[in-house]
Amino acid sequence: MQATTHLALINVFVGDIQGGLGPFLGTWLAQAAHWSPSRIGLVTTLVGFSTLFLSGPLGALVDRVGRPRLLIAVACAAILGGTMLLLPARSFPAVLAAQFVAALGGTLVIPAVAALTLGIVGKKAFPKQQGHNQAYNHVGILGAALAISFGTPLFGPSVAFWVLGLLAAGAIVATLTTPGDAWNPRRAVGWKEDDPEDKPERSAIRAVLGDRRLLLLSAALALFNLANGSMLSLLGQKLIAAGQDGTGWTARYVMVAQLVMIPVALAAGSLADRRGRRQLLVAACAVLPVRALLSAFLDDPAWLILAEVLDGVASGIIGVAMPVVVADLTWGSGRTQTALGSVSAVQGIGGALSGWVGGLLAIHLGWTWTFLALAVPALASLGLALWLEESCAPGSQDAAGTPCGAGPERGPADEARLDEARLDEARLAFEERRSG
């Protein structure tokens, strides 16, 4: 089995589990433990913010340890262990501790999978492979949602635990069976493979994270998530207030968005080299204000599917473009996963604030003006994306001098074979000229 096939399986399995129980947590706690919405919201907020602040340090751990296969397995085990601890948990401290363990694993798995991907395919093929990774992620999320939807009437809400357990076990097996010689530890952490030093010196964290382009990217993504994070939930609430089946339509919207994300992620991975990373970011940020306008002025739930198609387009692009741009800006530093974790944390803060901001806007402004207000940070995100210069222009090089283009990295053995082939060609040409 090829290493990229293992990557595909890993991403299918971790797509759903990296958030633990995710949206099913509230349902489980309400039914099994009879928790109030405010208590559920408090535990999710505390866990969410605490793991966000650990995102950068966990990325630095991936860079420092340099063993992404082991860290992916550990992360999946933490998700599985923390989620299973929720089954008997009823008190607030027990639920908080269990969710923290699961969320810690979900935060670690993102930079660990990115490191393994870079180590297997290299920098030049990373954009296309990241598109495949994200597509497989969404396939896994869809599959898990379908299994839980059909399994709940038969086995009750606890079926979500068993689906998650099977996915976590599958991810661990797929990770540990990935051939050890199929990935390069140097490029996994953002070091150039052809660096003459055996152990290059890592760039200072302050220098890497203080890069103006990385700061602009982080701010743009935080504003994107501030606008985007609460839109679907608010849309469901808007439909309920209008006497519609908000829960049923929300489930359909989630399915539509995930289905759209699969081809969009594949296309974004291919277009990143041909069109440039900046154009992808601009396209994603330009789509979001349109989604806000549709959500503000459309009332028919069937027509509102258009808004969720745009959600699939925007989120599908961001999931591919963000890690690729971070890799461009940090290549050669040995701090790629540190930067990825830090940018993810800033991005997550915007998403965490979105629910609170959206709720306040809905109370004071009403539904139409709430969505129009959310278009403001979306437009600000677009402005920052336009301001951000290209990190790797088509046919050019990134800041570290690595060519921008698809195709696997060549190692020393590949270079030796290439030199031998060139030598054979030269000998053949010489013999032809002598005989002629």
Image: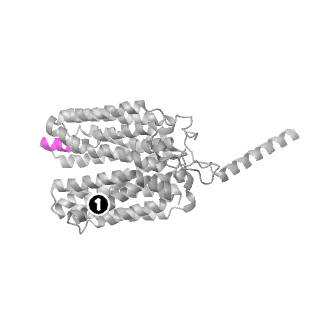
**Can residue 159 be seen here?**
yes
Residue 399, quarter of the rendered image: top right
> Which residue is nearer to you in this view: 357 or 262?
357
Identified at 78% across, 43% down, the residue is 426
Magenta range: 235-241
Q: Amino acid at mark 1?
A: Gln
**Residue 392 x/y as whole percent:** 51, 37
Q: Is residue 100 left or right of residue 35?
A: right
Residue 413 painted magenta: no
Residue that badge 1 annotates: 99
**Can residue 262 be seen here?**
no
Residue 240 painted magenta: yes
- Colour convention: one colour
Identified at 34% across, 66% down, the residue is 81
Circle 1 crowding by C-alpha within 10 Å: few under 14, some 14–19, many from 20: many
Secondary structure under the numbered disc 1 in the rendered image: helix
> Which residue is nearer to you in this view: 244 or 72?
72
Q: Is residue 258 left or right of residue 131?
A: left
Q: Main secondary structure of the magenta part?
A: helix
**Residue 146 x/y as whole percent:** 29, 56
> Which residue is nearer to you in this view: 46 or 78?
46
How many tags in the picture? 1
Whether residue 273 is situated above or below residue 248 in the rendered picture: above
**Residue 129 x/y as whole percent:** 49, 48
**Residue 354 x/y as whole percent:** 26, 43
Q: Is residue 266 left or right of residue 311?
A: right
Residue positioned most to the bottom? 88
- Quarter containing the C terminus: top right
